Image (tube, grey):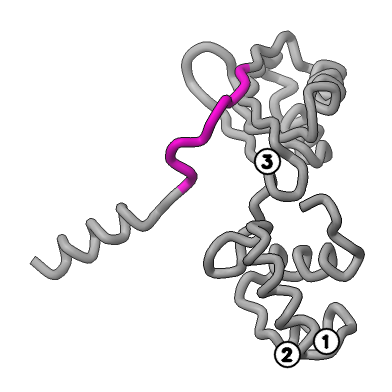
Amino acid sequence: MNNLDPTDLKILLALIRDPRIQIGDLSESVGVARNTAQSRVRRLIRAGVLRPGGREVDLEAVGYDVVAFVTIEVTHRELDGVIAALRLIPQVLEVHEISGRGDVWCRVVATDTHNLQASLRQVLRIKGVIRTETVLALHTHIPYRTEPLISGLTKATAG
């Protein structure tokens, strides 16, 4: 769904910033009538932009359909600066300090391979980055989830 207008984008930003926002507060923050906000949220859910529950944005549905995992080797004294610089790249969704090969692992999204290449070049220009290794995700079989863990805790505390 690449035909998001400025109001849709404001709604998405408001939901990202405060997933528990009430529809009345959402309409007020976006500057639209309550019924407009409600119908827009419903439309975004039907279109798959918002996942069931209406609070999590499906990035593929808004055009970010390339997902890559980037392992970065870093000069250790520059690690904090590298992480701070990665925070400034919008396509970088997650950053983890890791053990094993490499020092930092990132999940990066892009609109296409050219957009990904531009993001990777930004990463390579960061002071302290020695090298990167990028792996493309072809398909997500199990998206990020927490329900099985919480369900297991519920069963453990009930028994």
**Mark positioned earlier in the residue sequence (3 or 1):** 1
Q: Which SS class for mark 2? A: helix
Name the residue type under label 3.
Leu
Task: Name the spot of residue 103 as percent of width and height, x first.
Answer: 59, 19
Q: Which of marks 2 and 3 is nearer the N terminus?
A: 2
Q: Which amino acid is tagged 2?
A: Gly
Q: In this view, does 88 lie to the left or right of 6?
A: left
Q: Can residue 90 be seen in this view?
A: yes
Q: Which labelled disc corresponds to residue 24?
A: 2
Q: Mark 1 packing: few (<14 Cα in 10 Å), some, or many (20+)?
A: few
Q: How crowded is mark 3: few (under 14 residues within 10 Å), some or many (20 or more)?
A: few
Provide residue 127's location: percent of width, then percent of height. Answer: 84, 19
- The circle on residue 28 is 1
* Label 2 environment density (alpha carbons within 10 Å; few <14, some 14–19, many ≥20): some
Name the residue located 87 percent from the left edge and 23 percent from the top edge.
118
Q: What residue type is labelled 1?
A: Glu
Q: Residue 93 carries which label?
A: 3
Residue 124's tag is none
Q: What is the span of residues highlighted in magenta in the rendered image? A: 135-144
Q: In which quarter of the image is residue 29?
A: bottom right
Return the residue nearer the eye: 89 or 69: 69
Based on the picture, tell me whether residue 88 belongs to the magenta stretch: no
The answer to whether any part of residue 127 appears in the image is no
Distance of mark 1 from mark 2, alpha carbons? Answer: 6 Å
